[in-house]
Amino acid sequence: MPIFKKDKNKLRRIKEKSGISEKEIQNKTEENLQNIFGLEFVSSEFRVNNLRIDTLCFNKENNSFAIIEYKKDRSFSIIDQGFAYLSSMLNNKADFLLEYNEKGGKTLSRNDIDWSQSRIIFISPYFTPHQKAAINFKNLPLELWEVKHYQEDLVRYEKIEPVESSEKIETITGDKLIQDVTKEVKTYDLDWHIRKGSEKTKKIFYPLREKILELGEIKEKYLRRYVGYSIGDSHINFCSVRFYKQKLEIDILLPDKNLDDPKKWARKHPASYNWAKNSKRFRVASEKDIFYAMNLIEQSYQFNKNR
């Protein structure tokens, strides 16, 4: 999609720049990981066995590692390379953990990491139709992002969304490496969370979800512990939902001074949780409580929409 800049009453097209090197893409990405992906930088050119990882990152939201690879070669196989990197991570967990602790000055143990949510991100100025089609499997732990550079120092990162599919890659391949990786690395979807609940919580969740999505440009994402909702390209969840058999637990994010909660539903998380200081939780156990729940959720939305 072309980019235009308003010049008085005219729209002037901003031309795309070519000849951007792979290293320049890597440098710009690493310097802006938090803004682009919500990830923490760990290291560049990390070597493990026979593989060299361009950028190693850490996702604090779900305590997992992410690998970023930059590509200008259009002939590589997304599936083969992606699963090779993930397999290397899973077979060398101690090396990844040591790299994180040494570079970040942290003291995480192997059990602190959710290895099931490991993922790999490929970044390139262009992916072929064949490469884009390769990710059309259900719950694949691979992402493709196209990066475009334009005149006037404009840069755009755009995620290639896979075509919705019910097929899982492990069911159609006999490749042992892929099957071994998919036994440990999982991606989650809405159905997975719904199954954790019950018919009772489904009747609460669906109308609540509809109202949340009506608030604005809302992004819904699925992590192992909850379904999160953020605004536009923000990486901050203004609301998240956890499923249980008899209730939903809702997390919101806003300070006490901004909270209007006459029923005193919302409770702060204990400091031992190490969550954001303004995070609060409440329970919804009945359809009749949806209206009040949405009042609290909308307050969190309003507080976070311009952050």
Image (cartoon, rainbow, N blue to C red):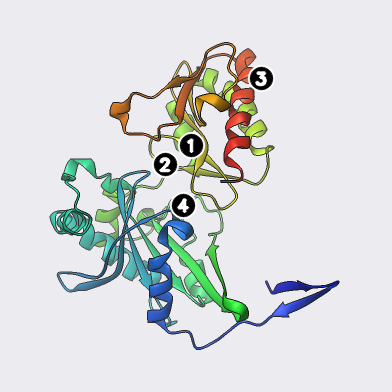
Residue under the point 19% across and 53% down? 105
Label number found at residue 291: 3
Give the foreground label among 1 and 4.
1
Calculate the distance from the C-alpha at mark 1 to the C-alpha at mark 4.
17 Å
* Mark 3 / mark 1, whichever is N-terminal: 1
Calculate the distance from the C-alpha at mark 2 to the C-alpha at mark 4.
15 Å
Calculate the distance from the C-alpha at mark 3 to the C-alpha at mark 1.
20 Å
Label number found at residue 138: 4
**Residue wearing tag 2:** 223
Give the foreground label among 2 and 4.
2
Relative to 187, say whether 158 is above or below: below
Label number found at residue 227: 1
How packed mark 4 is, by other alpha carbons closer than 10 Å (few <14, some 14-19, many 20 or more), is some
Q: What secondary structure is found at the residue carrying circle 4?
A: loop
**In this orientation, does residue 175 appear?**
no
Pick the residue in front: 217 or 179.
217
How packed mark 2 is, by other alpha carbons closer than 10 Å (few <14, some 14-19, many 20 or more), is some
Residue under the point 57% across and 13% down? 286
Q: Are marks 1 and 2 in contact (CB under 8 Å)?
A: yes
